[in-house]
Image (tube, rainbow, N blue to C red):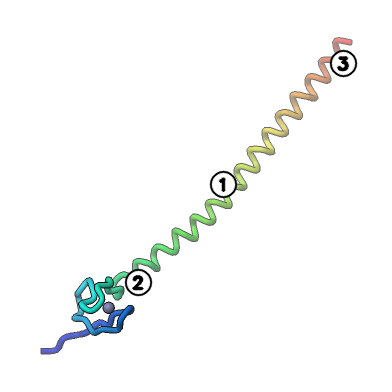
Amino acid sequence: MEEKTVYCEKCGKANKEGVRFCSGCGAPIESARKNVNRSVQIPAGRAVNTAWIKAYEAFLRIEQVAWGILGIILIVIFILFLIQ
Ligand SMILES: [Zn+2]
């Protein structure tokens, strides 16, 4: 009978393959979880990108509001000239 062993990353103790926790120190065996961590890193990168896009959209919105206020001021000045 051949049993594969997985070594604990924390204490180095040999555990049977398939066990979820180290029999020596109780730490979770990470052999299956590393792939999960790698797939999580991609959305984390996308989150940074969307943060930049949101900041850019907020800047565009502020610019639009600024142009709107400037337009209203110009119209008010134009009306005041007409009244005089
Ligand atoms: Zn251990």
Question: Tag 2 or tag 1, which sits nearer the N-term?
Answer: 2
Q: Residue at x 22, y 71 (%)?
A: 20
Point out the frontmost of discs 2 and 3. 2
Question: Tag 3 or tag 2, which sits nearer the N-term?
Answer: 2
Indicate which disc residue 81 carries: 3
Answer few, some or many: residues within 10 Å of disc 3's Cα (few below 14, many 20 plus, some between 14 and 19).
Answer: few
79 to the left or right of 53: right
Point out the frontmost of discs 1 and 2. 2
Answer few, some or many: residues within 10 Å of disc 1's Cα (few below 14, many 20 plus, some between 14 and 19).
Answer: few
Between residue 43 and residue 6, name the one nearer to us: 6
**Quadrant for the C terminus in the image:** top right
Q: Amino acid at mark 1?
A: Lys
Examine the rendered structure and indicate whether residue 53 appears above or below residue 14.
above
Q: Which residue is mark 1?
A: 54
Q: Position of residue 17 (x, y in %)?
A: 20, 79
Q: Which residue is mark 2?
A: 34
Q: Position of residue 76 (x, y in %)?
A: 79, 19
**Quadrant for the N terminus in the image:** bottom left
Q: Amino acid at mark 3?
A: Phe
* Distance CA(mark 3)–CA(mark 1): 41 Å
Q: Label 3's element?
A: helix
* Distance CA(mark 2)–CA(mark 3): 72 Å
Q: Given the current orientation, which residue lies at the most extreme left position?
A: 1
